[in-house]
Image (tube, rainbow, N blue to C red):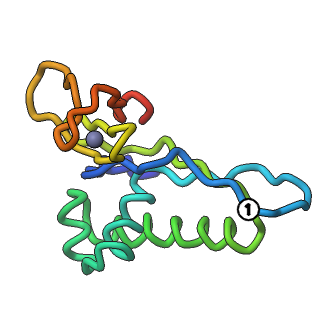
Amino acid sequence: MARPRQTSIVQIPPRVKGFIPFAYYGKVREPIKLNLEEYEAIRLLDYEDLSQTQAAEFMDISRPTLTRIYDRARKKMALVLTEAHQLLIEGGKALLEGEWYECSKCRCRFNNPQSKPVAACIVCDNPDVTRLNSCMQ
Ligand SMILES: [Zn+2]
């Protein structure tokens, strides 16, 4: 029997929903789906330079689980880069902590610990902010 998958914690949502190959004129390939925990594993290990033990702690999963997630993520990224696939960041078994917003003007991303909706950007006071959690799955 397969073990149930652990739910991992994603601290900061991705800025985009995906990527499209630039100046690629070959046959369009099906998009590769990177789920939220795979995105977070790459962000913590390769972008933030955390150790696997630290990243597993941040994501509230075991280190072996993190290793499996990271291996899957790297294989998917290798396919995207070498075979010119589109990349979609979606799905997965992850919790986004708090409500997250992005400002359309300064691109600042911030979360909201209060229960009432955010009216404007906390940095530049621009009222055009997008709630990011609504585009997560
Ligand atoms: Zn702003």
Q: Callout 1: 10 Å neighbours few (<14), some, many (20+)?
A: few
Q: Secondary structure at mark 1?
A: loop
| Pick the front one: 112 or 61 | 112
Q: How many numbered discs?
A: 1
Q: Quadrant of ligand 1?
A: top left
Q: Amino acid at mark 1?
A: Phe
Q: Residue lying farthest left? A: 114
Image coordinates for residue 62, horizontal then vertical, percent: 25, 65
* Residue 1 appearing in the image: no
Q: Residue at x 11, y 22 (%)?
A: 115
Indicate whether 20 appears above or below 79: above
* Residue 36 appearing in the image: yes
Q: Residue at x 39, y 72 (%)?
A: 67
| Pick the front one: 22 or 50 | 22
Image coordinates for residue 86, horizontal then vertical, percent: 70, 54
Q: Quadrant of the C terminus?
A: top left
Image coordinates for residue 113, horizontal then vertical, percent: 10, 34
Q: Residue lying farthest top? A: 116
Give the left or right position of residue 67, taking residue 101 as reference: right
Image coordinates for residue 23, horizontal then vertical, percent: 80, 63
The residue at label 1 has a CB less than 8 Å from ligand 1 = no
Q: Residue at x 8, y 28 (%)?
A: 114
Please give the residue where the numbered disc 1 appears in the rendered image. Answer: 22
| Pick the front one: 33 or 114 | 114
Give the left or right position of residue 68, taking residue 101 as reference: right
Q: Residue at x 19, y 73 (%)?
A: 54
Give the left or right position of residue 6, taking residue 29 as reference: left
Q: Quadrant of residue 65?
A: bottom left
